[in-house]
């Protein structure tokens, strides 16, 4: 693992130790977040599977009714019959926060609750299959909206899980090892410099002692010479 390109000083060492501490703490928090997101996502996926198994057969019945209607009514008449709907739906999309992820929440209202007002055509020129298709689709619409909300939430959670996973891996396999390797290198470098300084100090001390010894020998020799002269 390549170490960081920094100067091997004690100030840098202290700074890197603090950054390593933050990185380790952040790694743990992100890992916990990833695990919790995975738990929520799996539960959501199970709910979607159960809900879709309930909705899909009903939606297939709607398609079958429309297919029958298209078989007995000309495409022009079918298009004309469905051209001007009598009811409208207002959709309000808000968000809710799930583990720092803003997921959608849909709330909708129909302009009329009268079941007879959902047919935007007269019954003389259309078939009963079209009536059944529209009736089933109207009844199924709230469930389709709920399914869309759940699937969008699962999609956003999956994206956040992937982002969190990449961050966890970046810290675990890149950032933290780089900090550790750099701290190890700086400690070795500082220790090496300290040993070098101690060696130099010992050499200087030996030189000073030797110089003092030479001076003492010179003084002793001078005293002996004076004694012999006297």
Image (cartoon, helix red, strand yellow):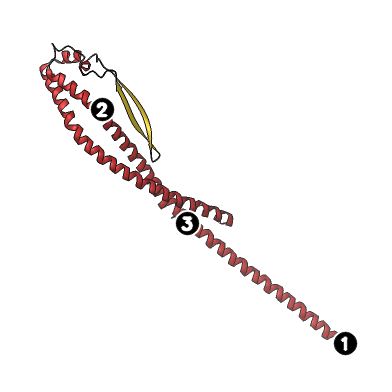
- Identify the residue position indicated by label 1 in the image: 229
- Identify the residue position indicated by label 2 in the image: 142
Task: Single out the mark in the foreground, 2 or 1.
Answer: 2
Task: Single out the mark in the foreground, 2 or 3.
Answer: 2
Tell me if label 3 and label 1 are in contact, CB under 8 Å. no
Query: Which quarter of the picture shows residue 152?
Result: top left
Of callouts 3 and 1, the N-terminal one: 3
Residue at screen point 56% across, 64% down: 191
Q: Relative to 173, say whether 121 is above or below.
A: above
Going by the image, does 80 lie left or right of 224?
A: left
- For the question of whether residue 190 can be seen, the reply is yes
Q: How many marks?
A: 3
Task: Single out the mark in the foreground, 3 or 1.
Answer: 3
Query: Which quarter of the picture shows residue 50?
Result: top left
Q: SS at mark 3?
A: helix
The numbered mark at residue 63 is: none
Query: Which quarter of the picture shows residue 221?
Result: bottom right
Going by the image, does 128 lie left or right of 9?
A: left
**Residue 197 locus on image (x, y percent):** 62, 66
Q: Relative to 55, say whether 20 is above or below.
A: below
Residue at screen point 85% across, 88% down: 228
Label 3 neighbour load within 10 Å: few <14, some 14-19, many 20+: some
Quadrant for the N terminus in the image: bottom left
Q: SS at mark 1?
A: helix
- Identify the residue position indicated by label 3 in the image: 180
Q: Relative to 123, say whether 155 is above or below.
A: below
Going by the image, does 83 lie left or right of 20?
A: left
Of callouts 2 and 3, the N-terminal one: 2
Residue at screen point 16% across, 26% down: 63
Label 1 neighbour load within 10 Å: few <14, some 14-19, many 20+: few
Q: SS at mark 2?
A: helix
Q: Nearer the viewer, residue 75 or 121?
A: 121
């Amino acid at each position: 693992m390549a170490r960081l390109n920094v100067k091997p000083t004690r100030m840098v060492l202290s700074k890197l130790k603090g950054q390593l501490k933050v990185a380790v703490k952040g790694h743990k928090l992100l890992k916990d977040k990833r695990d919790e997101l995975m738990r929520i996502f799996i539960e959501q996926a199970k709910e979607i599977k159960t809900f879709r198994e309930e909705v899909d057969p009903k939606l297939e019945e709607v398609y079958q009714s429309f297919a029958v209607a298209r078989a007995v009514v000309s495409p022009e008449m079918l298009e004309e019959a469905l051209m001007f709907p009598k009811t409208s739906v207002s959709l309000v999309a808000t968000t809710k926060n799930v583990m720092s992820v803003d997921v959608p929440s849909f709330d909708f209202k129909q302009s009329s609750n009268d079941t007879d007002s959902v047919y935007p055509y007269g019954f003389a020129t259309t078939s009963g299959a079209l009536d059944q298709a529209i009736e089933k689709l109207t009844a199924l619409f709230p469930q389709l909206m709920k399914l869309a909300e759940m699937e969008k939430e699962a999609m956003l959670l999956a994206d956040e899980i992937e982002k969190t996973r990449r961050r966890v891996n970046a810290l675990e396999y890149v950032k933290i090892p780089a900090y550790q390797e750099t701290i190890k290198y700086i400690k070795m470098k500082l220790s090496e410099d300290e040993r070098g300084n101690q060696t130099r100090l010992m050499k200087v001390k030996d030189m000073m002692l030797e110089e003092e010894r030479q001076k003492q020998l010179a003084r002793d020799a001078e005293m002996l010479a004076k004694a012999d002269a006297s």
